[in-house]
Amino acid sequence: MQTIFIMIKCDLGKAYPVADALVENVEQVSEVHSTSGEYDLLVKCYLQDSDDIGHFVNEKIQTLPGIKDTFTLIAFKAFS
């Protein structure tokens, strides 16, 4: 299982509809947080080891209406 975090810039006034669309339409999305600063949303996703991260972000995330820009982080290990 791969864990990635995607920071998303939304079109003005579109953060809530984008968050709803992510939760409702993208099964790999685990959590969506609204954030302050340069990006509007922080999205945690779990992908299968065989999934291509680039294709996932380009085809499943960046194509949703209201998304202006993304920045993807790949997580190596979770500590608890």
Image: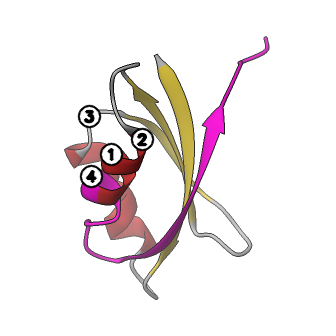
Q: Which residue is mark 2?
A: 53
Q: Amino acid at mark 1?
A: Phe
In the depicted view, which residue is nearer to us: 10 or 53?
A: 53
**Measuring 33% from the left and 45% from the top, which residue is drawn there?**
56
Q: Does the CB distance between marks 4 and 1 fall below 8 Å?
A: yes
Callout 1: helix, strand or loop? helix
Q: Label 2 near label 4: C-beta < 8 Å? A: no
Q: Which residue is mark 1?
A: 56
The residue singled out by tag 3 in the image is: 27
Residue 58 image-quadrant placement? bottom left
Give yes or no for contact between labels 2 and 1 (Cβ–Cβ under 8 Å). Answer: yes
Range of residues picked out in magenta = 59-80
Q: Is residue 70 left or right of residue 29?
A: right
Q: Which residue is mark 4?
A: 60
In space, the residues marked 2 and 3 are separated at their CA atoms by 14 Å
Left or right? Give the position of 79 relative to 33: right
What crowding class fits label 4: few (fewer than 14 Cα within 10 Å), some (14-19), or many (20 or more)? some
Element under disc 2: helix
Q: CA distance from mark 2 to mark 1?
A: 5 Å
